[in-house]
Amino acid sequence: KAKKWLQMAARQNFHRAQFELGLFLFRGLQQGKPNHQEAIKWYRLAARQGHARAQFELAMMYKDGIGVKQSFYEGYKWLKISQRHGMKGIDRPLAMCAQKLAANELRKAFAEAKRFRARNDYHPDEARK
């Protein structure tokens, strides 16, 4: 039942529900087996709306290559974005990603993170129509 309600809220672009659904899928809470590809989809949607924890989880999936092709570039970029949105305690994974990038890649990822602007697509009134 939890998944059903999370899906309903997530499909209405409610970023907190998108994050929670991603977490639900990542941990494999439905049938005991994770669905990383589906989890990353929901994390990405919440992350684009400014959800710091979703941004962090997305970054870690890129850093570790879970559900996506490993990318220290994307990991670094999303870690910097999550840091800007208030995520604490990310110095170690941030430094690890930075070590793996060439100087020009690091500058480019930093610039992309700096340009990032969250979009809040949640419109509660739309659900009533």
Image (cartoon, rainbow, N blue to C red):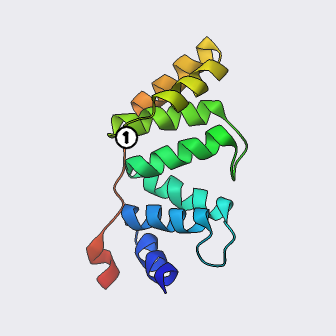
Mark 1 closeness class: few <14, some 14–19, many ≥20 residues within 10 Å: some
Query: Can residue 16 be seen in this snapshot?
Result: yes
**Residue 12, x across and y down, in percent:** 40, 72
**In the image, is 113 to the left or to the right of 106?**
left
Among the 4 quarters of the image, the one containing residue 100: top right
Residue 49: image location, x then y, percent: 39, 52
Query: Mark 1 highlights which residue?
Result: 87
In the rendered image, the residue lying farthest to the top is: 103
Dividing the picture into quadrants, the one containing residue 127 is: bottom left
Q: Please, what is the three-letter code of the amino acid marked with disc 1?
A: Met
Is 47 rendered above or below residue 1?
above
In percent of the image, x 34 and y 56: which residue is there?
Answer: 120
Q: Please tell me whether mark 1 sits on a helix, a strand or a loop.
A: loop
Q: Nearer the viewer, residue 85 or 91?
A: 91
Is residue 85 shown above or below 26? Answer: above
Residue at far left of view: 125
